[in-house]
Amino acid sequence: MPKVVDHQQRRDELVRAVWEVISREGIEGATVRRVAQAAGVSVGGLRHYFDNQQGLLIFAAHAIGRSVAARVAAHLEADLPGRERAQRLLEEMLPLDGNRRVEVEVWLACLVRSHVDESLAELREAAWAGERFVCRLAVASCHGVPAPGGVGRLLADAGLERQAERLHVFMDGLTLQTASFPGQFTPETIRAFVREELRLLTDE
Amino acid sequence: MPKVVDHQQRRDELVRAVWEVISREGIEGATVRRVAQAAGVSVGGLRHYFDNQQGLLIFAAHAIGRSVAARVAAHLEADLPGRERAQRLLEEMLPLDGNRRVEVEVWLACLVRSHVDESLAELREAAWAGERFVCRLAVASCHGVPAPGGVGRLLADAGLERQAERLHVFMDGLTLQTASFPGQFTPETIRAFVREELRLLTDE
DNA sequence: TAGGAAACCGTACAGCTGTGCTGTAATGGC
DNA sequence: GCCATTACAGCACAGCTGTACGGTTTCCTA
């Protein structure tokens, strides 16, 4: 029988290469040749796992959501005081270390491209729903109310749902600014921004 | 002597074409051929006004800042109550009509590209300072304190300066969300977001 | 150990890219 | 009228792009 490789794992490795290239060269620099080189394979080898460039990029973009979701889920299982849990949840979406910085960079590139590339529309919607969900989790956690039943479910209290809306806008702004001006934000100042916002939220 | 054309005006027309193409096809779709076609000239004609593509894109991106600045200046001359003036100032940076939608789209594309294209770094810094300045103007206007002396000058009151910082983050988030999900935001809901934020600001 | 299937490579090709360059049309002062 | 000078058109060219495809290596199983 043939040489056996773990397809799932191989695709994840290739996705890593896509992220690396996009974060370094931008999404228009994510050519099949460059991705292949970053992954240490040939273009032919790359196409064994992805039929075309579009499929590769979409898969790589979706992988970001999965990556964030996994970390968020881990925080939900941990036993933490409400405010602290909210802080941790939100921090997973911000460029606080190398990994998250790459994720944010790739995500922004994909989001902006989705404005003119309809094949990324579904991804954009899914990511928006995911972000909103995390914001609802954070608000619920802060106020000690039950977490929403799942992605797409609103908070029972309309006022808190509005807080989640506002928090979502704030988080997107913080993401954009911290990604665009890394020199002006240390991880600690970013955390302080989130902390302050959560404080205002609960005082309100 | 030769045929005489208004160089300044001609360049502005070409910039319009760049904006149109970028908002429709993304920044990687802004090729010299497509821009030339959108402007109704040949590639050779285009190069008569811009030595290369990079110069064209940078000039077009800078033009957005000038466009917003002009509208902001007009509001500063008008005699309006503080809160209302702040609202108008901030609205000039949001995609509330076709013109501003195009500006926002182009600006986001350039900002994200600037993360990997150092030739846009200066533009990014300038735009950030401009946005921050408008936010400071809005905060000052809301609280009836003197406007800052110019771009780069902080508000005298440290608490208000922090409010401007927060407002800036919020505005960037609102810009990103409204540009990415135009279907979910009518101009009126966008205005309501700004109004609510200004209300929270003054109550604080 | 032989076979075969999957993994992977490298080239080929058409199409698009930015830019250089040459040719042409138009205009306003003499 | 003339013609210098600018505005503009369009082709040339090298380089990069995504994708198709035939060949080669590698490994497991029978």
Image (tube, coloured by chain):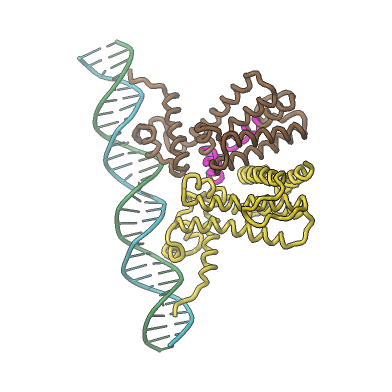
Chain colours: A yellow, B brown, C green, D cyan
Q: Is residue A139 left or right of residue B186?
A: right
Q: Is residue B118 magenta?
A: yes
Q: Is residue A199 left or right of residue A42?
A: right
Q: Position of residue B149 (x, y in %)?
A: 69, 24
Residue plotted at (54% across, 55% down): A61
Q: Position of residue D19 (x, y in %)?
A: 38, 58
Q: Position of residue A57 (x, y in %)?
A: 49, 56
Front position in the image: B90 or A52: B90
Magenta segment: B106-134
Front position in the image: B192 or B107: B192
Residue A80 in view, yes or no? yes
Corner quadrant of residue A165: top right
Instruction: Give the answer, above or below, for where D30 lies relative to B71.
Output: below
Q: Is residue A47 magenta?
A: no
Residue plotted at (33% across, 20% down): B2
Prevailing secondary structure of the magenta residues: helix
